[in-house]
Image (spheres, rainbow, N blue to C red):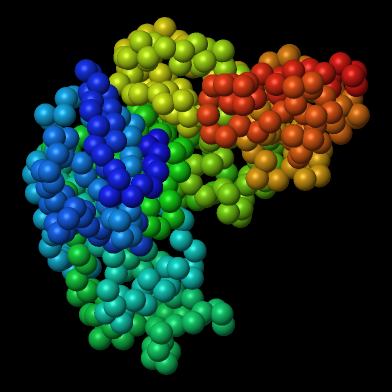
Amino acid sequence: MAFCRTVDISTARTGATDRRGEAVAGCLRASQAVSQGGVGTRAFGDRHDTVGHARHRACACQPHAFSNGPGKVHIFPLCMLHMVEESVESLPIVTDSTRSQSENIETVVARLRSQRLVVPDYQRDAEQWDKRKESLFIESILNNLTVPAFFFFQREDRKIEVVDGQQRLSTIWKYADNQFPLSDDESMVYLTPQSMYYRGHKFLDLSQELQATFNDYPLTIIYLPQNLNIGTKLEIFRRINEGGTPLTAQDIRLSYYSKSKSVTFIRLVGLHGCSQAGDRILRYAKEKGVQNPWEKSKKAYQLWTEWWEGKLKARGQVPSEMFLWYLATRNRSSLNNLLATPDQIKHLNIAFRGSTEGALDIYCAQLHWTEEHDGLNTFPTGDILQEQFDSFASWMCEILGRGLTGISVDKYKQLALVIAALSDQGVLLRDVSHDAWDALGEFIRTPRQAGKKWLEVGYSEQKGRWGGEKGQYSQCMRAYELVRKILETYP
């Protein structure tokens, strides 16, 4: 989504906007990473205030920045935030104030149980925390230690959305509901010798005094201003999470365009194993009339799950990103044509600045727009999308089933390109010889070396750009050519 670079404030200058207001060139946007979801400050000169209160009026475009050390800020291309498509006179984006108050755990849990406090779809999937992290967080509460603030947003229907803090709230709710004991593992290093009173204990095992301490603990709740659009809420969510486990571009794009059935389909492909988060995604998809694409590929799903399960790389939406890479590679010509000129994507209200991540954003945005406006299918949807998935699943099943050495999840992007190239050429699984499999495995593991061997122009790894000789589009074309040569050489 939005990319940033660090500059020295003393040499930074604000720029102008184009006539459509798609960009505020040079606007100083920054992010002070807020560890574990805490509150950052915006700073200009001697002005410091909580996020949502700062107002800088020294220049026409009113730049916003988050401090990142003395004299340093991050610059964010404003057009990529999905928040500004109007003139500079519309700034600041948020005019209402942010308010903060304390609410005890007992009150917050009651709202969760009554579903007045809800987690919207753009929030991060739950279950990112392991038993150790959950236990240490509950210990902090039992000892009245300060924990990071929560960000809520009250909707017009009076329900309250959790903008940030889902994992912490989920942990609090589960513990209050007596669903898990604090870890009693020998490796756990609790704060005090008094941990004997809660180590290995569920909530109802605690003394009455500790239960009261837990229920009465005051949580700091920051309520965001009213009338925020989805883009602004997403951007706030992204920024306040930068200090913890960072959101990926895939996390954000799948959430932002989650109303699209095709984007939901892509998200479902990323499922692996059983989890509450996965069940939630499946329920949401079922409500939208989208079936689990793995239903007819049981063996492939088992191998897919074993491949991703327990891997650090599998957190967030990386598995679904692999499938999106595959789709973008298979449909690379349509995507490249769409990106060719700004007029081609004006209807999407999103600027393209040449990055590969930006190209994937456009892919999902176009899927969303096609369904919203009943437009022509630039990219596969419906049955054709299912067919492309079936091909993906079949090749994944064959590759993982063969146990090719060195094909780890770290190679997911390269593997997606190879599967797309195989699918494009209409190759049948049974027609790939043993020697060809060896060569394909070498290409997946060491693409640059394979490029030198098979291609005159080589196979240079792209640097985050879509176009150009070393861009992602060229790499997709070279992957196709290299796979074709392997299959011709080893029939």
* Of 444 and 130, the residue lying toward us: 444
Residue 223 in percent (x, y) is at 16, 53
Observer-nearest residue: 84 or 398? 84
Instruction: Give the quadrant of residue 348.
Output: top left
Left or right placement of residue 149 versus residue 318 in this view? left
From the top left corner, tell me how far across and down residue 220 is, in percent.
20, 65
Q: Is residue 124 above or below residue 490?
A: below
Residue most toward the top? 376
| Residue sitting at the far left | 96
Q: Residue at x 14, y 57 (%)?
A: 47
The percent position of residue 65, horizontal first and vertical second, equals 25, 48
Residue shown at the point (11%, 55%) measured from the top left: 99
Locate residue 245 relative to residue 312 in the image: left or right: left
Say left or right for 315 vs 427.
Answer: left
Which residue is at the front of the view, 174 or 478?
478
For the image, the number of numbered tags is: 0
Give residue 429's position: percent from left, percent from top. 80, 23
